Image (cartoon, helix red, strand yellow):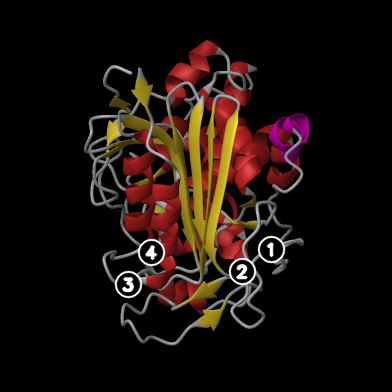
Amino acid sequence: MTQRHPRTTLQRLLDRAVTEGGVPGIVAEIREGRGRWFGSAGVADTETGRERAPQERFRIGSTTKTFVATVILQLAAEHRLSLDDTVDEWLPGRVRGHGHDGGKISIRRLLDHTSGIFSYTEDPEMVNSHESHTPDLLVDIAMAHPPAFEPGTDWGYSNTNYILAGLLVERVTGQGLADQIAQRITRPLGLDGTYLPSGADPTIQEPHPRHYTKLLDPAPDAEIHDATELDSSMFWAAGSMISTTGDLHRFFSELLGGRLLPPAQQGEMFTTVPTKNWIPDTAYGLGISSVTLPCGATVWGMGGAIFGSWSYTYGTRDGEHMAVIEVNGDWANGPWDDPIGIFTDVLRMEFRPPKTAGPA
């Protein structure tokens, strides 16, 4: 018989993330078959000492991309667009300037980050110089820079790709991106805590933890700011969504299990390319990524990083064994360089092969 490690070991890791890593609070929810385990450490609010809780809503950053890619792949399944359509076919003239050419970039290259389009977040000075952020403004910031490479010749993570993907959804459907995500994913699946905020709405619906940020300052004693109230329109389709551990479990279990996309589109989503200058040991598909762990196991899902909240949702290819982890801070000290180090340790612990027990 086989024995999986006791999750008391996993709880100790969460405790260490707070005591040694210095994160304000952390939650982890594991689902394996019909079993569920929830663990937490630290606090949701450093002033009141309120503990973290399973139903809390938090910002999920780039995990938004998985929702957007799913919508586009559903539209492809409905023959309302093709992944081989160029950006110019749907957004004529939108990708132009400084060497960018939307006539040479397919929708597929947006979704798997092989477009070469400059990522507007690489110009924080320009992004921060505007009080409000429309999708068109974000694309304009990107177009003011040359592309990183010719389409299809390399891989480079670009948030502009998904801003354009969101605009494509709206052009094809004639509806807002938030409405499409709600109609196609969150309402049918009963994801009551998951949504794309409206415009510049800075709030998070209750209940939620406070979100704390050091504003990318790597110093251990850097000042900590409360980023709970955040105009996330600067990230929109690339990273604005809000969700819960339970909702992320449901969404990714359904997606990985093949219940949100037909087989052809499922195959497209999980066709990966190697990443570069991103998270080690990863590959990227269409809005989804894989991580190969030291034990040799490969897990699938997506991570998200935004001011005050970093999260990971990864699991087995069939979606039957999933882990969701979130910290309400964007730093980690001690043994870890950042929260991704903590998340990786959780995945290593949870998805390592179970030990084989000796004779009874």
Query: Which residue sits at x=52%, y=43%?
Result: 65
Q: What kind of element bears circle 2?
A: loop
* Quarter occupied by residue 175: top right
How far from the left and from the top, in percent, is residue 42? 53, 68
Disc 2 or 1, which lies upstream in sequence?
A: 2
Q: Are marks 2 and 4 in contact (CB under 8 Å)?
A: no
Residue located beneath label 2 in the image: 44
Residue depth check, mark 4 versus mark 3: number of the one nearer the observer = 4
Q: What kind of element bears circle 3?
A: loop
Q: Amino acid at mark 4?
A: Arg
Q: What kind of element bears circle 1?
A: loop
Query: Taking 112 as reference, is 206 above or below it?
Result: below
Q: Main secondary structure of the magenta part?
A: helix
Disc 2 or 4, which lies upstream in sequence?
A: 4
Q: Is residue 157 visible?
A: no
Query: Which residue sits at x=65%, y=57%?
Result: 53
Query: Taking 218 as reference, is 326 above or below it?
Result: above
Residue located beneath label 4 in the image: 16
The C terminus lies in which quarter of the figure?
A: top left
Query: What label sits on residue 208 in the rendered view?
Result: 1
Disc 4 or 3, which lies upstream in sequence?
A: 4
Q: What kind of element bears circle 4?
A: helix
Query: Taking 284 as reference, is 42 above or below it?
Result: below
Q: Amino acid at mark 3?
A: Asn
From the viewer's side, name the closer residue of 145 and 21.
21
